[in-house]
Image: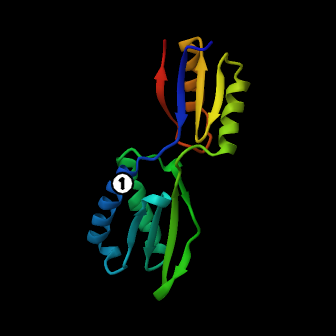
Amino acid sequence: MPDNSFDVVSKIELPEVSNAIQQALKEIQQRYDLKGSHSTIELVEKDNKVLLASADDFKLKAVIEILEQKLIKRKVSLKGLEYGVVTPAAGSTVRQEIKLQQGIDADKARKIVQAVKDSKKKVQVSIQGDLLRVSSKDRDTLQEVMHLLRSGDFGLDLQFINYRSN
């Protein structure tokens, strides 16, 4: 029976995103090239989305760049952002939606499980909703699995939580 385990999750801290948006909005108001561009950034927490709007594509790209810089400073991984298409909006403005990755979807969870199985480590990996539980008798093996998952690119920002050992 495995005694040691940890959970693999992929979550974005919404308070950090909110703070980054506030900082980005301050910078946008001060930047000469964005004055009068009616650029906005809005966090929709219940849908895990960020809505961006600006006068044109060029200014929208500048807004995205500012937001990304602020997110990086607040240690929010850009891997967790999924950019939607730029759509025209009223008054010749443009909009874009960014989805925030919360949890590990089934396809990516299967890829992660397969990568762990391919490594031939003596661990059990179970998919539990939007997280993975990795368990083993040996703590060192769990550390090796963590290292394997950190070095692999699954298109997600993975965090390791609930490390338990008996």
Q: Residue at x 70, y 38 (%)?
A: 110
Occupied quadrant, residue 52: bottom left
Q: Nearer the viewer, residue 2 or 42?
A: 2
Q: Nearer the viewer, residue 87 or 102?
A: 102
Q: Is residue 60 above or below residue 20?
A: below
Q: Position of residue 33 (x, y in %)?
A: 34, 74
Q: Position of residue 29 (x, y in %)?
A: 28, 71
Q: Is residue 9 above or below residue 16?
A: above
Q: Nearer the viewer, residue 51 or 60?
A: 51
User: As drawn, is 78 to the left or to the right of 72?
Assistant: right
Q: Position of residue 36 (x, y in %)?
A: 33, 81
Q: Position of residue 108 (x, y in %)?
A: 66, 42
Q: Residue at x 54, y 21 (%)?
A: 5
The colour scheme applied to this rendered structure is: rainbow
Question: Which residue occupies the extreme bottom position in the image?
Answer: 91
User: As drawn, is 102 to the left or to the right of 25?
Assistant: right
Residue type at mark 1: give it: Lys
